[in-house]
Image (cartoon, rainbow, N blue to C red):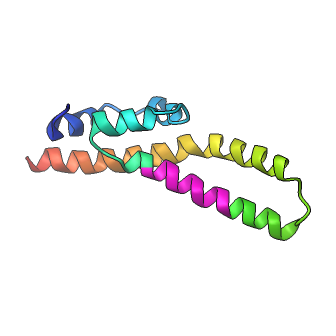
Amino acid sequence: MTTKLEGFQNRQKDIGWGYAIAHVIPFVGLYYAITRRTVTPLLFTVLGNFVIGFAYGFTVGIINPNYDEKKLENSAALIGLVTAPILAKKGIEKARKYGKEKIDSN
């Protein structure tokens, strides 16, 4: 188990898109949350995709109520795959900033 300081320090290493893109792989977000001691990227990804998916389905349902449900599921899944890394990257950036503040205050 990593200590808080180790988690804060590990977050500072995550400057690229590697872990952000890897969030589309099952359990990577959970691994990241444990080793970096932050749930921010995981929450950004899960809640962000939930909101985007709901808004997309709601909008398509209003515009075309007879839209094929299978096509809607496939297109929503594709949107989720595209938005997950972007949302995870935003969460990682926020967690890095918070970790840097905590390291600087110690």
Front residue of 7/14: it is: 7
Principal secondary structure, stretch drawn in magenta = helix
Q: Quadrant of residue 1?
A: top left
- Judged from this view, the residue extending furthest toward the left is 106
Q: Is residue 36 left or right of residue 106?
A: right
Residue plotted at (45% across, 48% down)? 90
Report the label total: 0
Residue plotted at (7% across, 46% down)? 106
Residue plotted at (30% across, 49% down)? 97
- Judged from this view, the residue extending furthest toward the front is 69
**Vertically, is 53 above or below 71?**
below
Q: Is residue 99 left or right of residue 40?
A: left
**Vertically, is 68 above or below 9?**
below
Q: Is residue 82 magenta?
A: no
Q: Is residue 53 magenta?
A: yes
Front residue of 72/20: it is: 72
Residue plotted at (48% across, 44% down)? 88
Q: Is residue 3 left or right of residue 95?
A: left
Magenta region: which residues? 43-54
Q: Quadrant of residue 32?
A: top left
